C-alpha cells in the first residue's frame, strides 16, 4: 500500500552526515521524497510502500550516524504528491530555530587511513575531514550549518571536492569543511618574529624543531597550544620559565594508546574516553614505567593525557623519535584562550620559538575538555571542546532563561524549550579581555538559539563582575542565586532528583547569606528553596585574598583564632621565618582590620597544606589543596583526628582539636602522607556524623543527598564520603556530566530559575 509521511527530526542532526544517511535509507527502501535542513532540525518527506516506510523509520531511529543524537521524531501522514525520486534539497533558513549546534569532533579512522595512503589525493593533508569528524562549532558564523555560513566560505571547492560533496553516496556528501591540498586551508611555519620560514614541508620542519628542544605555538581547532618534547626536561623547564607557570601540571598529547600504556594506568572507561570523538584530556594515574620530564607534572601522581584529535596533530607524530608532546593552552595566566594570529604573536613574544599556523579562521575558540574517572564515575574538571554546546534536556519549558555563572571557571547557560545549552569554559572574569570573550560567545549563542530575554540569573556575590555585565542585556527580570544552592541544584537537575534532598557542598569560596564566606555547608531543600542546616566554624582571613594566595597566612590565622595564645605559639614555631608577620596578622584579627570570615573546605585544606609544609605560597588556584590530596591514598585506611560540634541554631563543625593535633605532629616530624590521610578521613567522618545528627535532630528524614562543589574533584573525599553515606542508607548523587566546580554553577542557576518559575505559575 502506497502512503506518504512528513517527518521532523530534532536533535544533533546537522553537520553529522544525517542527510546522506537519510538519502541512502530512502534508496535502500525504494522510497521517494526529499530531505532538508531547516531551523527546526531535519525535515523529511517520504512516499512509498507503507511497510518500507515503517522499516525506514526503525532504521532512522536505531542506525543513525555516530555523531548524531536524535531527541525527537515527529511523523505525520499526508497526501502523496507522486514524486518519482528522492533528493536532498537546499536548506531552509527561515523560522524559529530549534537547532542543536554541531560540535567539533576528533578525526575519524577513515580519514586517517586516507591521510596515510600515498595513493590518496589527500595524502598527509592536515585538514582532511568528513561528515563524521572535523571542525564544526569553532567555524560556524550563522545557522543552519552550511558552508557559506562558516569560515570555510573563503575556500571554494575544487572539482574533486565538489564531486564528493554532491554525491549522496559519499561520506563527504555535504561535509561543510571538505577540503584538499588544491582548494583548502594550508599551514605555514613562522619564526619568533613572525616571518615565514621557507621550507618544503612546514610540519616536518616543526617536528625537527621540537626534537631539538624548541617551543612551538601550534594553532589547532579551538585555539593555540604551546608545545615541546615532553621527554626533554630542559625544554619543559624552559617553557615553564617563559610562561611563568612554575608548578601547575601540563597536559600532554601522546602518539597512540600503546604509548599511553607506557605512562599511565588505564581502565576500560578511560580508554574509551581517550579514543572517543570528543577526545578530551583524561587525568590518569602515572604507572611505574612513567619516564617523562620531571617538570611536566611535578609532585603529582597523575598526568593529563590526550590523543591527537586533528589530522595536523597526527602528522606531528610521524617521526617515531617523538612520541609525547606537552600540549598546553597558550593563553597567558588569567587571559582567555588565544585563537587570533595577531594576538598569538603579541602575547607569545618571548615564549614561542616558532609558530605553526593555518589560514582556516577560528570563529569560536574552545579550550580542551578535562575529565577524570573518580570513584568509577565521570568527573568533569572542564566541559568544553567536543561537548559544548550540546544541550541537556529537562522536563519543563525553560525558554527565555539565561544564567551567567560566577567569577571563576565561568560558563553561561541558555534555556530554550526543554533544552539547556551550557556554553564553553570561559575562565576567570578578572580582566577586560576575558569579559569581552564571555560577551562575544554569549552573544553568538543568543543569536543562534533565538529566545526572548525574559529572566537573567546571577550569583549573589556583590563583587562578581557578572553583577555589572548583566546590566548590558535587556532582560525583563534579574534574579540573584546563592552560590552553594546553585551547586546543589545542578546535581539535583542532572540526576532528576525528586522532592527535597540534603546537599553537602564543599568548595573554596561562595558568598553567604550572612555576609561571610561559605564553602563547607550542608543544605536541605530543593531547587526552589533551601535552608542551611550545618556548616564549618568561621575563621578569619586577614588580608582577604592574600590569605588565599599565601596559605601559611590562613594557617596561622586559623590557629590563632581557634587556639588563642597556644595557637599563636604553634604558628610561630612552625613558621619560624614569619614571626613578625604573624604578630601583624594577630593585630589585624584582634582589631578586625581588612579581615573577612570564612568557613570553607578549600581554606581548611590550604591551612593544613601549609602546616605540613606542602604549599605555603600558591602559584595557581587550588595548588595547596591539590598537593595535599596527592599525599592521601584513597585506597588506604586512616584514623581520624578529634573534632567537635557546636549545636546552636545551625549545627557547626569545630576542627580546633584536629588542627592542634596536626600542628603537634608536624613539630614531632611525623610523616606528612599519614597526616594528610588522617586529615582527609577526619573531614569525611565529621561530615558523616553531621548527617547522622541531622537525621535525629531535625524533621528531615529524607535520605537523598547530593555532593557538589569543587572539593569533590578530590578522589579521597568523593570515594570515602560516598561509601560511608551509602553504608548508612543514604541515596548519594554526584555530578557526572556537569562539573562539580564553578563550571557547573550556571547549569544549577537555571535549575533554580526553572523551579521558581514553575512555582509562580502554580500559584
Image (cartoon, rainbow, N blue to C red):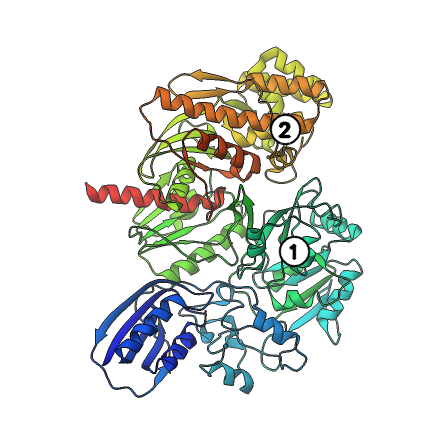
Q: Which residue is mark 1?
A: 347
Which residue does the image show at 56% across and 47% down from the upper left?
372
Mark before the other along the chain sequence, 1 or 2: 1
Nearer the observer: mark 1 or 2; the answer is 2
Above or below, comparing residue 198 to residue 660 in the picture: below
On the picture, is 425 further left or further right than 419?
Answer: right
Answer yes or no: is residue 688 visible. yes
On the picture, is 143 further left or further right than 207?
Answer: left
Identify the secondary structure beneath mark 2: helix
User: Mark 1: few, some, or many residues within 10 Å (few <14, many ≥20)?
Assistant: some
Above or below, comparing residue 644 to residue 554 in the picture: above
Q: Quadrant of the C terminus?
A: top left
User: Mark 2: few, some, or many residues within 10 Å (few <14, many ≥20)?
Assistant: many
In front of the other: 649 or 412:
649
In front of the other: 297 or 283:
283
In front of the other: 155 or 17:
17
Identify the secondary structure beneath mark 1: helix
Answer yes or no: is residue 552 visible. no
Residue 576, quarter of picture: top right
In the picture, the disc for residue 184 is: none
Which residue does the image show at 24% across and 41% down from the upper left?
759
Asked whether the residues under the numbered discs 1 and 2 touch, taking CB atoms below 8 Å apart as contact, a structural biologist would say no
Q: Which residue is mark 2?
A: 676
Q: Could you say where residue 516 lies in the image, as x and y percent from the top left?
A: 46, 27
As measured in the structure, the alpha-carbon distance from the residue carrying label 1 to the one carrying label 2 is: 39 Å
Amino acid at each position: 500500500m502506497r502512503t506518504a509521511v512528513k517527518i521532523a527530526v530534532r536533535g544533533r542532526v546537522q553537520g553529522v552526515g544525517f542527510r546522506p544517511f537519510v538519502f541512502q535509507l530512502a534508496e535502500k527502501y525504494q522510497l521517494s521524497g526529499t530531505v532538508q535542513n531547516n531551523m527546526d532540525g531535519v525535515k523529511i518527506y517520504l512516499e512509498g510502500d507503507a511497510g518500507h516506510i515503517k522499516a525506514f523509520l526503525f532504521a532512522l531511529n536505531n542506525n543513525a550516524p555516530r555523531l548524531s543524537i536524535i531527541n525527537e521524531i515527529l511523523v505525520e501522514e499526508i497526501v502523496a504528491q507522486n514524486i518519482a525520486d528522492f533528493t536532498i534539497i537546499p536548506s531552509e533558513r527561515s523560522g524559529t530555530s530549534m537547532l542543536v549546534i554541531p560540535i567539533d569532533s576528533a578525526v575519524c579512522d577513515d580519514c586517517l587511513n586516507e591521510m596515510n595512503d600515498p595513493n590518496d589525493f589527500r595524502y598527509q593533508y592536515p585538514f582532511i575531514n568528513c561528515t563524521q569528524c572535523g571542525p564544526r562549532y569553532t567555524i560556524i558564523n550563522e545557522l543552519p550549518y552550511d558552508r557559506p555560513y562558516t569560515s570555510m566560505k573563503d575556500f571554494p571547492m575544487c572539482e574533486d571536492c565538489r564531486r564528493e560533496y554532491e554525491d549522496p553516496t559519499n561520506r563527504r556528501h555535504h561535509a561543510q569543511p571538505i577540503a584538499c591540498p588544491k582548494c583548502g586551508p594550508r599551514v605555514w611555519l613562522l619564526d619568533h618574529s613572525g616571518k615565514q620560514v621557507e621550507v618544503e614541508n612546514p610540519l616536518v620542519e616543526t617536528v625537527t624543531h621540537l626534537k631539538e628542544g624548541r617551543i612551538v605555538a601550534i594553532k589547532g581547532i579551538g585555539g593555540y597550544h604551546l608545545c615541546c618534547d615532553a621527554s626533554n626536561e630542559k625544554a619543559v623547564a624552559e617553557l615553564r620559565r617563559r610562561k611563568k607557570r612554575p608548578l601547575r601540571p601540563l597536559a600532554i598529547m601522546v602518539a597512540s594508546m600503546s604509548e599511553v600504556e607506557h605512562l599511565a594506568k588505564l581502565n576500560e572507561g578511560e580508554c574509551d574516553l581517550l579514543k572517543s570523538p570528543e577526545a578530551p584530556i583524561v587525568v590518569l594515574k602515572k604507572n611505574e614505567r612513567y619516564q617523562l620530564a620531571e617538570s611536566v607534572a611535578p609532585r603529582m601522581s597523575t598526568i593529563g593525557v590526550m590523543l591527537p584529535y586533528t589530522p595536523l596533530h597526527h602528522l606531528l607524530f610521524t617521526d617515531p623519535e617523538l612520541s609525547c608532546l606537552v600540549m598546553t593552552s597558550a593563553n597567558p595566566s588569567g587571559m582567555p584562550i588565544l585563537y587570533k594570529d595577531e594576538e598569538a604573536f603579541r602575547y607569545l613574544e618571548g615564549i614561542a620559538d616558532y609558530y605553526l599556523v593555518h589560514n582556516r579562521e577560528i570563529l569560536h575558540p574552545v579550550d580542551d575538555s578535562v575529565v577524570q574517572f573518580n570513584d568509577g564515575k565521570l568527573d568533569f574538571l572542564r566541559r568544553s571542546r567536543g561537548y559544548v554546546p550540546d544541550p541537556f534536556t529537562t522536563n519543563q519549558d525553560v525558554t527565555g532563561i539565561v544564567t551567567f555563572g560566577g567569577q571563576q571557571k565561568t560558563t553561561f547557560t541558555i534555556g530554550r524549550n526543554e533544552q539547556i545549552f551550557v556554553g564553553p569554559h570561559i575562565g576567570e572574569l578578572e580582566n577586560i579581555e576575558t569579559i569581552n570573550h564571555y560577551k562575544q560567545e554569549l552573544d553568538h549563542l543568543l543569536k543562534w538559539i533565538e529566545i526572548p530575554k525574559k529572566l537573567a540569573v546571577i550569583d549573589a556575590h556583590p563583587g562578581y563582575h557578572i553583577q555589572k555585565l548583566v546590566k548590558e542585556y535587556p532582560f525583563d527580570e534579574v534574579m540573584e542565586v546563592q552560590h552553594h544552592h546553585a551547586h546543589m541544584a545542578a546535581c539535583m537537575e542532572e540526576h532528576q532528583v525528586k522532592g527535597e534532598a540534603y546537599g553537602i557542598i564543599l568548595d573554596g569560596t561562595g558568598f553567604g547569606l550572612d555576609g561571610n564566606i561559605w564553602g563547607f555547608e550542608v543544605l536541605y531543600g530543593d531547587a526552589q528553596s533551601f535552608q542551611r542546616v550545618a556548616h564549618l566554624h568561621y575563621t578569619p582571613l586577614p588580608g582577604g585574598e592574600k590569605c588565599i594566595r599565601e596559605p601559611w597566612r590562613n594557617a596561622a590565622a586559623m590557629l590563632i583564632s581557634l587556639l588563642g595564645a597556644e595557637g599563636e605559639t604553634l604558628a610561630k614555631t612552625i613558621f619560624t621565618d614569619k614571626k613578625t608577620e604573624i604578630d601583624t596578622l594577630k593585630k589585624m584579627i584582634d582589631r578586625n582590620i581588612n579581615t573577612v570570615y570564612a568557613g570553607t573546605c578549600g581554606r581548611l585544606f590550604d591551612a593544613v597544606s601549609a602546616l605540613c609544609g606542602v604549599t605555603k605560597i600558591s602559584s595557581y588556584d587550588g595548588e595547596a589543596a591539590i598537593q595535599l590530596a596527592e599525599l592521601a591514598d584513597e585506597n588506604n585506611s586512616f584514623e581520624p583526628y578529634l573534632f567537635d560540634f557546636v549545636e546552636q541554631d545551625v549545627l557547626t563543625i569545630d576542627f580546633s582539636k584536629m588542627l592542634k593535633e596536626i600542628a603537634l605532629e608536624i613539630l614531632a616530624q611525623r610523616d606528612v602522607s599519614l597526616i594528610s590521610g588522617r586529615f582527609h578521613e577526619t573531614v569525611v567522618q565529621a561530615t558523616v556524623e553531621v548527617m547522622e545528627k541531622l537525621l535525629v535532630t531535625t524533621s528531615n528524614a529524607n535520605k537523598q543527598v547530593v555532593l557538589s562543589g569543587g572539593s569533590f574533584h578530590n578522589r579521597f573525599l568523593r570515594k570515602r564520603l560516598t561509601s560511608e553515606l551509602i553504608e548508612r542508607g543514604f541515596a548519594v548523587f554526584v555530578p557526572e556530566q556537569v562539573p562539580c566546580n564553578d563550571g557547573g554553577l550556571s547549569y544549577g542557576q537555571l535549575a533554580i530559575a526553572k523551579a521558581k518559575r514553575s512555582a509562580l505559575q502554580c500559584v
